[in-house]
Image (cartoon, rainbow, N blue to C red):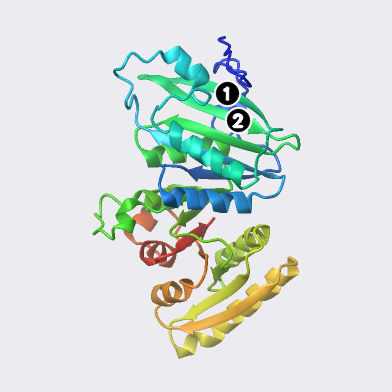
Amino acid sequence: MSESSGKGFDVINAEKAPRDLFTPGSGARPNRFRILVGIDGSDESYRGLRYAAKLGGGVDADIVLCYVRPIDQGLRSGGLQVRVARENMLEWGLELPGIKYLRQGLKLLQELGVMDDSWQEESFHQGVEGDPLGDNKTVYSSPTGKQVTLKLKVAPDIATGILEQWEIGEYDLIIIGASERWRKRRVKSFWDPALAEKIAVHAPCSVLVARELEVGHGHLICTDGSDKAEDAVRIDAELASRCNCPVTLLSVAHDDDGEPDAVAAVARASTMVESQGIEVHETLVRIGEPVKEICETGVDYSLIVLSDTARTGLKRFFMGSVAFKVLEEARNSVMIVR
């Protein structure tokens, strides 16, 4: 076991580290609300982090900032002393891939008042075959038990790295910034869906895709009256209450004949939310094509929220659903609840 002389660090190798650091499925701490934020240095990723800080304001919430880099990126030359990098990578001013973005995220959380000088920190390393630095993380813990983690992860690609990180920690929510493909409104390739969409398709938990996300404009929660939609209403109403965001409920009928069912759906959802002790700001019913109506209504809100109705990732990819079409077409942030 190697030990760092860096201030505040207790560096442990993978053999000595607690199992929950690297064992799939064992990273979740009981009774914690765990948020995984993908950090890539973009404005959207830091907007997502701000939202995570708001959602994770309670002492029961943990936030993990994760930067994924390809194996051996930028480390083949330059005489880097790998041992020093492993033991001090977040303490030293090394300009390794991803470090500056994680440190910027840490600084943002400090500025937001999420962290202070009373937090303790530990650094951990796990070797990854074919990469000299491997996976590295620094865990910051408050006296009350809240944690913020910076994770520099090695993976073949970003989507794989984020999904592998879920297997380690079993998060309640993944927040990912919208891809450059969306920002530039490029034509999408059928065989190469945008990064955020790929993660949203395959992640086992709820996924929030941040696009120009501004806190405080409320959550537009969509329901069609199905069991899954009502589960999404219940789950997101609780999330909205964490950040004091107003809750608006929306149901869309395809035509006039379906309007009574839409009215009944929002009425049931409203009763359910109020039974949770959460106020419903407004209920809305629209008539028309659901994706169009949801996207047009959603521009006035911080977040459009929908349930995932597709059964498998394959079905979501090839056939799509209202939720995934809204994710693709909406100009503001969208969360798909599972």
Q: Residue at x 47, y 47 (%)?
A: 203
Q: Nearer the viewer, residue 99 or 30?
A: 99
Quadrant of the image occupied by residue 332: bottom left
Residue named by callout 1: 123
Q: Residue furthest top?
A: 1
Give the mark, 2 or 1, whose residue is nearer the N terminus: 1
- Percent x, y for residue 338? 54, 55
Residue named by callout 2: 139
Instruction: Answer few, some or many: residues within 10 Å of disc 2's Cα (few below 14, many 20 plus, some between 14 and 19).
Output: some
| Label 2–label 1 contact, CB within 8 A | yes
Quadrant (top left/top right/bottom left/bottom right) for the N terminus:
top right
Secondary element under disc 1, as helix, strand or loop, is strand
Q: Is residue 73 above or below residue 313?
A: above
Q: Nearer the viewer, residue 253 or 31?
A: 31
Secondary element under disc 2, as helix, strand or loop, is strand
- Percent x, y for residue 198? 38, 49
Type of the residue with mark 1: Ser
Mark yes or no: residue 256 visible: yes
Q: Is residue 106 left or right of residue 272?
A: left
- Gap between marks 2 and 1 measured at Cα: 6 Å
Q: Is residue 288 above or below residue 299?
A: below
Q: Is residue 117 left or right of residue 198?
A: right
Type of the residue with mark 2: Val
Q: Is residue 209 above or below residue 283?
A: above
Instruction: Answer few, some or many: residues within 10 Å of disc 1's Cα (few below 14, many 20 plus, some between 14 and 19).
Output: many
Q: How many marks?
A: 2
